[in-house]
Every structure is written in C-alpha cells, then in structure tokens.
Image (spheres, rainbow, N blue to C red):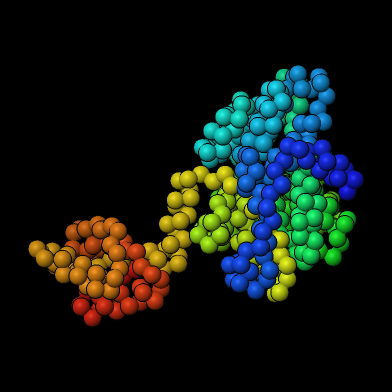
Amino acid sequence: MVTLQKIQAAAARIRDSIFVSPFVRSETFSKLTNNSVFFKLENLQMTGSYKERGALNRILLLSDAERQRGVIAASAGNHAQAVAYHSTKRGIKAQICMPLTTPLVKVTATREYGAEVILVGANYDEACEEALRRCREQNLTFIHAFDDEEVIAGQGSLGLEMIEQQPDLDVLLVPVGGGGLISGVACAVKETHPKIRIVGVQTSKLPSMKAALEHGSPVTLPAKATIADGIAVRTAGSLTFPMVEKYVDDIVTVDEEEIANAILLLLEKEKTLTEGAGAVTTAALLQRRIPHNGKNVGIFIGGGNIDVSLLSRIIERGLVKDGRLVRLRIHLPDHPGALQRLAAVIASEKANIEETKHDRAYYGVLLGDTAIDITMETRGPEHIAVLTAALEAAGYSHERVI
C-alpha cells in the first residue's frame, strides 16, 4: 500500500515540472451552499488535469532500458495527454489506446503532445485490454491510469499541496473513477490531518468504487455512457480499493443532469471551464450530498478537457432548465398577419424569439390553421409565467415543449 513517505517523495520528485495550481475561495459558491468553498483548479495544468502528477512520477522512475523501449497507456483522455506530454518531453516514445467514444478534443491533444493514438473498444476497459496486449507483444512499459503505486503517490501530492495552501479544511470532495486520485489524496490528508472528512464523488451511471465498498471487493459494472467520461471506470482498482476502504469516509453519487448543471454554473458564475468528471464534486456540493453548513470545503476541479459540441448542448439544456430558454407550441390561423400579431404579443412581454417552425399537418392542426413552435430567450420561470398569461389573454392556445 502507498505510504505518506512515498507520496512525499513523489511530491519532491515532480515539483519542478508541475504547476502549483491555485486553491481559491469562491464567494459565489460559498453563499450558494452556506459553506466556505475553496476550488483547487487542476484544470489549469499544462494538459488540463491533475493526471500529470501520477504519470510524471511513474515516468521519472523508468529505467534506461524502459525509456528506450517506450511506454503505453490506456485512457479516456486526461491520463493519455499526461503520459503523451511528459514522455515526449523526455524523448520517450508513447502509445495510447483510447476508446472509440473519446471526445475529439482529447484525441487531438494526445496526438499533438507526440503520442501514437490507437482508437479501440467501446469503453476504457476494452481499450485497456488492447494496451496490455500491445504491452506484452512489444515489451513496452504499461503506465496504468490509476492502479499503480507510483501513479497513486504522484496524485497524492495534491493532498499535500492542498493542506499546505489551506490547512483549515473540514471536508474534501474528490472525484472518483478507478480510485487513483482519492487513494493518494486521502492517504496524504488522513496521515497528516486525520480530522478532515474525505468524501468521494462518482457518477450514478458507473459507481464502481461505491459498489466495491458495498460488496467488500471490486466488482465489474455494466458499461454505460456518461458525460463524466474521465471517471467512467467499470471496476475499482485492486490497489486503490483497500486504500479507499481505509481512508475515505464516504462515497456519494450525482446524476447526469446534476453534473451538466454544475458545468454550466462553474462556467457562468465562476468563469471556470471543466469537463464532466471535473464537475462531479461541485455537483455533489450543490445538490447537498454532504450535510454540512458553515464548514471549510475543498473542491477538486479535476479536468478542463471538454468537447466543445458537448459543452454547447450542456449550455442549451441548462438554459432550458433555468427557464432562460423556452419553446412553446402555439396554434394560430394560417393567414397573412397572424404571425405578426403573435410576435407583437411576445415583444410586448420583452421575450426574444430565437427560432420558429411551422407545421400544418401534425399536432392535431385544423385545416386553415397552423401550429408554430417558437423558441424564446426569457429571464426565468417568472418571466415565462407572465408571457404565457399574456398569450392566453390574447386568445392563443399553447403548450410548453419539453
């Protein structure tokens, strides 16, 4: 099992090559949650995530022969970029096996950092199988994304760094996939500040560590798609599980909508961009998965490598959920001037029309009438209520399109 001494050695080893990321208090999220909230901004690392710490520590411990043969890894993105960047920087050839579903932004970045990318398998586990096959076939050194003592020790440097930056923490929320980050961080924190409560956060789609704790050993869950692709691990690590069992106080889960909402709020309120896996801890805090008030709470912003098309969809869905974007289906006579009169009612309530779509054959439309779907920007639920009341007063039947 990884020890505090091993983590301290890793922290010293990687110090000159790793950015000491800010650990800053958020006034907005502190007010929202009635706690004093601090964000550890690991999305500001060179490759966009904390994964650099563990990957670099493992790479620095390679023998000369291992460096000459090269390394291989399997990853959904962040570990891939970390291995690619720090291997290439030191003249070491790297192969990365990534699932076919990996966001393009992560695939492109991994190639740009100098690695050979092999897209294979529907999920991390299948990509990992291929990486291990290639490792045996080509006599490469496999750098595991989480179930490796040196990787765990490298991630644990974060725990030491956070305690140094903010020694008065009461609670620490940590994202959990296979368990590499939380194992190292929990060991570092509990061995130096045992009163700090460590809570892991997983996506409800793949709560592999939570399931392992309930079962008493790692179990393999069915593969599922999630926007938290960076922690979409079906089986908890054999090395990380006992460390989580020893050091971690609780594991909680958040669903897809809660993660998406956290991404949007971090972007809008905190001006911080993070991916799904990096936002699960914020989601847990916002959804009151931890029953704390008036505490100093540390939050990991673990990774900032989000696909821009996914971000666009998250923003749009978030606006709908907040009532700042609404679509109404309105029936009206199909003759000149009808749309103009309808638009005048909408304009009078200061809603902005973004998109319209007519339909004359569906939705039970009478001959001579039309149904029109109108997407509008609004100021929130109260504004929508005022708008729909004005439409009713003007004689327009309508329904909200969800």
Task: Depth check: give the residue in front, 39 or 332.
Answer: 39
The residue drawn where x is 51% and y is 37% is 104
Whether residue 372 is visible here, answered yes or no, is yes
Whether residue 120 is visible here, answered yes or no, is no
- Residue 215's spot in the image, x, y percent? 78, 56
The residue drawn where x is 78% and y is 40% is 15
The residue drawn where x is 65% and y is 43% is 45
- Residue 320's spot in the image, x, y percent? 42, 63
Give the answer, above or below, for where 294 lies relative to 71.
below
Give the answer, above or below, for where 256 lies relative to 397.
above
Quarter holding the C terminus is bottom left
Left or right of 273, for residue 251: right
Give the answer, above or below, for where 177 lies relative to 389.
above
The residue drawn where x is 85% and y is 65% is 195
Question: Which of the 4 image quarters holds residue 112?
Answer: top right
Question: Which of the 4 image quarters holds residue 280?
Answer: bottom right
Task: Depth check: give the residue in front, 143 or 293.
Answer: 293
Left or right of 341, for residue 317: right
Give the answer, above or below, for where 65 lies relative to 194.
above
